[in-house]
Image (spheres, grey):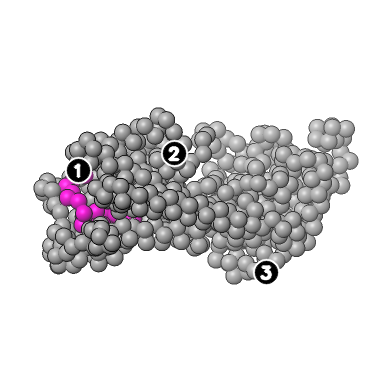
Amino acid sequence: MDILWQRLIKSLLIAVTVVVALVILYFVALDYLYVVLGGVLVGGLYALAALGLALVFGVMKILNLAHGSMMVLGAYLSFWFFTLYGIDPFISVVLVIPILFLLGFAIEYFLMDKVATLTAHQPVLVAFGLMVVLESLFMLLWTADPRGLVLPYSGARLTVGGLHISLTRFVACVLSVVGLVCLAIIMNRTLIGRAIQAVSQDFKAACFVGINARRMYQLAFGIGAAFAGFAGSLISVIYAFEPTSGLAFVIKALAVIVLAGSGRISGLIIAGVVLGIIESVGAMIIGGGFKDAISFAVFLLVLLLKPEGLFGRRG
Amino acid sequence: MLEVRSLNVYYGNIQVLYDVSFKVEKNELVALIGSNAAGKTTLLDTIIGWLHPKSGSITFNGFRIDHLPPHKVVELGVSIVPEGRMLFPALTVLENLMLGAFTRSARKKIQENLEKVFEIFPALKERKQQLAGTLSGGEQQMLAIGRALMANPTLLLLDEPSQGLAPIIVTKIFSLIKELNNWVTILMVEQNAYKALKVASRVYILENGRIVREGESQELVKDDGIRKAYLGV
């Protein structure tokens, strides 16, 4: 209980600091406030993108390089649902999530499971191969042209106290946070979540208490893929994407995880928001074309100067 | 209840167990003693299904279990307190116990078994919200036993329950094991031959992967060869 209170107070303090900073910006430099707000909104999405990757890495110790391509797949599926059937991406996401879950489950069951017991780098190579296969598949199905979704309300804005906020970005951010909270609940409050945690802490011990550890791997990989698809659907509404966008996505997700330094969900949210803000402020100063380079720089600087991340422990 | 017949187990190309056969009857407390690298842990790992034998059979209540994975064996009523305890250090005592009752059959009796475990180990009840990694060695061993009991076993496997514990705690753990035997059949492997001979009804001696002696504890304690080799007298 004490730990819970401490955490609550800590997050409240952070929230208050952020609000105060935003209020100061509002009066001092309105331009920057917009940039920072944009960063905050996109940060939620970054955290969501990082979540599935962190889950798979934490449980299976596999760096799933195909995670970004699974996000792109989610984006293409949304694109398909919208252009073929006119289903709004914020609604079709409830279809994309189970599709990607099944796909992830199947990939683990038929592919990863066969190599997971070999050496540590083999699953990574399989993931890399998977990324290449997915990219080729996207090229085949949807051509190499960049795609983007233009919704009837893409230009709509929310106006709060004289501030204009993009509606789609706002909704995407809210849905991201909802997704993050849902996963936190699944992991901490359900039997399956506990079992997945047990497997990640000690594989052999988990088997010994009667957990089917391989099945938990399949579920974890499925959930990871589902959340990749979730993030991809939301991204399709905001950014243009193409078959090879996956690598940039996975690197950005990795930057969030490295910055957070732990797979804990609250840490990922804050790291996502911090990266979002750094990126958009940086883009404003040195130019929008350098956005991805900025997250790379953050990634490298964190590894160099504070390898344990914001919330991780050294060693 | 448990019957192991001509078991041959390998790690890759290296044979660890040679033609091992033994039996555990219902309500017995059987000890397997042997020095380091005698194959004790390998034997328990094979019974629980973590390893599979190259030849030979393991039957539990008449079922062949030698090719089942651990979660199936646990479901049938065999449960293990592994070497080095293997708790989930970042989960609380209560969460560790709850995970012990993961199988379907154990989940039905979860409340009943939890009360029983807290009755046997009152210290665990006091510390149920504490993280398992912060417990003392003796408490961790109690938690490991409690977690295994939550699986509602009819056969309990104990892998070196005295390992890494202070002598006074070892005595306490062994008297608890003796008490547990009133509820559940126990197969224990142990390096501490003196203590094992004291609590067990029957003993097998494992040397370099082979069973070299077996007998009632009272007999073996009197045997000169055993006294020299294992009891240091």
Question: Badges 1 and 2: C-beta atoms under 8 Å apart?
Answer: no
Q: Mark 1 points at which residue?
A: A244
Query: Image height check: is B165 above or below B157?
Result: above
Q: Name the residue under label 2.
A: A309
Question: Which residue does the image show at 13% across and 48% down from the upper left?
Answer: A146
Task: Give the CA distance from mark 1 to mark 2.
Answer: 28 Å
Q: Which of marks 1 and 2 is nearer the N terminus?
A: 1
Q: What element carries label 3?
A: helix
Residue segment shown in magenta: A226-245
Q: Is mark 1 on a helix, strand or loop?
A: loop
**What is the three-letter code of the residue carrying label 3?**
Glu
Q: For mark 2, name the chain.
A: A
**What is the three-letter code of the residue carrying label 1?**
Thr
- Badge 2 crowding class, 10 Å Cα cut-off, few under 14, some 14 to 19, many 20 or more, is many
In the picture, the quarter occupied by the C terminus of chain B is top right
Res. B112 mark? 3
Task: Give the CA distance from mark 3 to mark 1.
Answer: 56 Å
> What secondary structure characterizes most of the magenta part?
helix
Q: Residue B189 appears at what percent x and percent y? A: 71, 45
